[in-house]
Amino acid sequence: MRAQPFRPFHVKLADGRTFRIDHPEFIAVSPNGREMVIYDDEGMSLIEMLRVVEVRMAKPPEPQEKPGTQTKPAPTEGESP
């Protein structure tokens, strides 16, 4: 959670739910380390750490083209553009 730069990750629970953490402000761990709070589109979830079965790094999003731009390879020698 304190990696610089922050890298999004997933938290999977024993009941099958998975939460994607896209920003460090979307998760907080209690001072005793036994619970965490995750904020998402559905609100806030208080989770016991014993319920966590997996934490894995999220794949970075694919870069998106800006409207009106095209990504073409540069012409090779002897090719006309």
Image (cartoon, grey):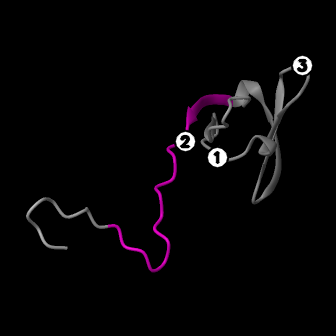
What secondary structure prevails in the magenta region? loop
Is 48 one of the magenta-colored residues? no
Q: Residues within 10 Å of mark 2 (few under 14, many from 20)?
A: some
CB under 8 Å between callouts 1 and 2?
A: yes
Note whether 9 is above or below 76 in the view shown: above
Q: Which mark is residue 20?
A: 1
Q: Residue furthest top?
A: 32
Between discs 1 and 3, the one toward the N terminus: 1
Q: Position of 32 compared to 21: left or right?
A: right
Describe the element under mark 3 as helix, strand or loop. loop
Q: Is residue 77 above or below residue 24?
A: below
Where residue 21 sits, quadrant-wise, is: top right
What span is in magenta?
52-71
Q: Amino acid at mark 1?
A: Arg
- Neighbour class for label 1 at 10 Å: few (<14), some, many (≥20)? some
* 77 with respect to 33 (left or right): left
Q: Which residue is mark 3?
A: 32
Report, in whole angstroms, how far the alpha carbon at label 1 lies from the one at label 2: 8 Å
